[in-house]
Image (cartoon, rainbow, N blue to C red):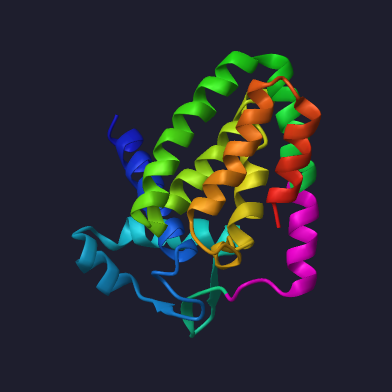
Amino acid sequence: MKSSLITSYTEQLTEQFRLMILSGEFEPGQRLREIPLADQFGISRGPIRDTFLQLTREGLLVAKPNAGVRVAEPPSLFKRKTLVALRRKLEGDCLKEALRQNPRELLAQLTENMTRYYIACQKEDLEEVVKIDMAFHRIIVSGADDSSLLTTWVPLISQMFLKYSRHHSLIESYQEHAGILEALNDQDAALAARLLREHIV
């Protein structure tokens, strides 16, 4: 039981650090140090170290010998285009499969997510927006093949460094998601898939 709790806490810490990077609280190139962060969160260095390892695997952190750990720089244009193509393919296929397996559950989860998403966008709470935005897409990927593709999807979306700067306001991001959900509620899977592809940039 103790081991399970430790794993759960480390996963929570990893999720929190991931959101802090993607929302810009930890900036590209910023060095992260174990001891100050452990003191800040009131924990031992072990969970911090485990979080660093996981986020380094995902590509959000870069670890170099004798240079410590730093937040990765946003992807190059070539890398971003590649990640976009891969993510569009993965999420598009998962959406089709999730609709085939359990459309009612998918729609219920996405509808609940959108309620929270609207509130976060209205409050302009960027960290919460990033969290709920990722959750929307995670629901789609989780709905296919018993969530087995999540381990492939998480590094893809993390390394993209989600670009909210393309919107005039955060509510525009909500509206893009709302369009996908509306198409799904109208049972127009083709339109939903197209809107999903267009949303991933």
Quadrant where the C terminus is found in the figure: bottom right
Where the N terminus falls, by quadrant? top left
The residue located at (62%, 29%) in the rendering is: 182
Q: Is residue 87 left or right of residue 29?
A: right
Q: Which of these two is toward me, 4 or 89?
A: 89
From what the image shows, is residue 14 above or below residue 70? above
Question: In the picture shown, does residue 135 fall above or below 126?
Answer: above
Q: Residue at x 52, y 46 (%)?
A: 174
71 w.r.t. 121: above or below: below
> Residue 100, position in %: x, y?
74, 17
Residue 65 picture location, percent across and down: 53, 81
Which of 184/58 is in front?
Answer: 184
Residue 113 coordinates in the image, percent (x, y): 46, 34
Q: Residue sitting at 81 percent across and 30 percent down?
A: 190
Q: Is residue 79 left or right of residue 14?
A: right
What stretch of residues is rendered in magenta?
73-87
Name the image quarter holding residue 36.
bottom left
- On the rendered structure, is 193 left or right of 132? right
